[in-house]
Amino acid sequence: MDPVPLAVVLLVDPRGWVLLQERDEGAPRAANQWGMVGGHVEDGEEFEPAAYRELLEETGVALPAGTLRLWQDAQFAYDDGFRGRYHLYAAGVDLTDADIVVGEGRQIVFVEPAVIPTLDLAESTRHFVPDFLASDLYRSFRRAS
């Protein structure tokens, strides 16, 4: 089976905190765990428009076209054999938790990077987010304190 196409978005606030979603018990994958915002690319849809659509559906945030930057195009396989082809997009934003409308899951909030490893993370989040936090792209979004 081909990898499932997935478009995910990592938003970074001025403090350098990353937007993550606490999924609920009804999530088809990684129920009750913390994950990245985003999801399946629909048939006939391209990855980038899917990222903007998923962001809007899950958070109520409508970013202008051209805001998101592709960070990675990578495949990842969960321990149960599920394989995804991830396009991971990122952007620095001047948003707070109050700007987020939770469209899916328990909560979607900006999380301090030092706290992220202490959360019960989805496998894909555990795989990708540490590399993102070590990337030049992530550092470019952080404002000097």
Image (cartoon, rainbow, N blue to C red):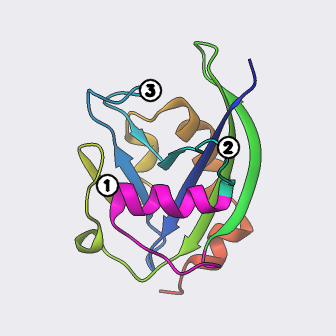
Residue farthest front in this picture: 44
| Image location of residue 115, percent across then percent down | 39, 51
**Cα–Cα gap, marks 2 and 1:** 20 Å
Q: Position of residue 89 (x, y in %)?
A: 63, 61
Q: Is residue 113 visible?
A: no
In-front residue for pair 86/15: 86
Q: Amino acid at mark 2?
A: Tyr
Residue pushed farthest top? 80
Q: How far apart in space, not on screen, are marks 3 and 2 (Cα)?
A: 15 Å
**What residue span does the magenta drawing correspond to?**
48-67
Residue depicted at x 55% and y 78%: 142
Q: Is residue 3 left or right of residue 128?
A: right
Q: Position of residue 73 (x, y in %)?
A: 77, 49
User: Sequence order check: which comes first, mark 3 or mark 2?
Assistant: 3
Q: Which residue is mark 2?
A: 86
Q: Which mark is residue 108?
A: 1
Residue 68, image x, y percentages: 62, 71
60 in the magenta segment: yes
Mark 2 surroundings within 10 Å by alpha-carbon count, few (fewer than 14), some (14 through 19), many (20 or more) = many
Q: CB of mark 3 within 8 Å of CB of mark 2?
A: no
Q: Earlier in the sequence, mark 2 or mark 1?
A: 2
Majority SS type along the magenta span = helix
Residue 94 seen in the figure: yes
Q: Secondary structure at mark 3?
A: loop
Reading the image, the residue beneath label 3 is: 29
Q: Earlier in the sequence, mark 1 or mark 3?
A: 3
Q: Is residue 74 left or right of residue 141?
A: right
